[in-house]
Amino acid sequence: MVTGMRDKIHILLVDDDPAENLILRRLIRKVASTEIELHYAETIEAALALLQSGAPINMILMDNRLQPQCDFRETVPAMRQQGFIGPIGVISSSLADPYFQSFEEYGADFRIDKAELDPTAIEFILREYLS
């Protein structure tokens, strides 16, 4: 038996802008195929603490720029060093910076522009990385 998309999926959003949490929550409610529980951390420290707590996180969506770190090239490796082996996606309002071309080298699985994040994109990401 294949565990289908009906199981609850736990996504951790790491973003220093609380408005992004509200936006993503609204989008996730429109994803019909899956039950998603969104966890939220405003800092990399809070995200690491959540992982250490043993919370059942299936996927991490990491804002590209978090204070005081510069970008995902510092934050994603920190999550990997904590032992997180699930998919990590980098979300950003712009993917124009050249370092986005080598996102896999830093342990990220995918990158997506915040403007492209909609229920359809979320369903695709879940199918692609969690099934």
Image (cartoon, rainbow, N blue to C red):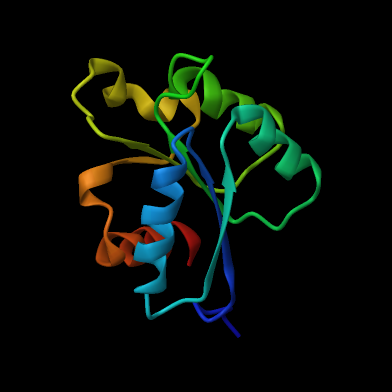
Question: Can you say whether 126 is above or below 78 in the image?
Answer: below
User: Which quadrant would residue 102 be assigned to in this image?
Assistant: top left
| Circle count | 0
Is 52 placed left or right of 120 in the picture?
right
Name of the residue lying farthest toward the bottom: 1
> Residue 43 location, x and y as percent?
59, 30
In the image, residue 131 above or below residue 108: below
**Position of the N terminus by quadrant:** bottom right
Q: Position of residue 59 (x, y in %)?
A: 54, 52
Please state if 100 lies on the left or on the right of 10 as rendered: left
Q: Residue at x 45, y 14 (%)?
A: 70
- Seen in the picture, residue 32 relative to 82 is either above or below; the reply is below
- Could you say which is closer to the camera, residue 93 or residue 2? 93
Q: Residue 81: where, in percent of width, then height?
A: 68, 27
Residue at image point 57% right, 48% down: 40
Q: Which residue appears at 75% of the width and 37% of the height?
A: 49
Q: Residue at x 67, y 28 (%)?
A: 45
Residue 38 is situated, as x and y percent measured from the top left of the image, at 54, 59
Up-down relation of residue 4 to residue 75 (above or below): below
In the picture as drawn, the residue positioned furthest to the right comes out as 53
Q: Classify residue 38 as left or right of residue 103.
A: right
Q: Nearer the viewer, residue 32 or 3?
A: 32
Dividing the picture into quarters, in which one does residue 77 lie? top right
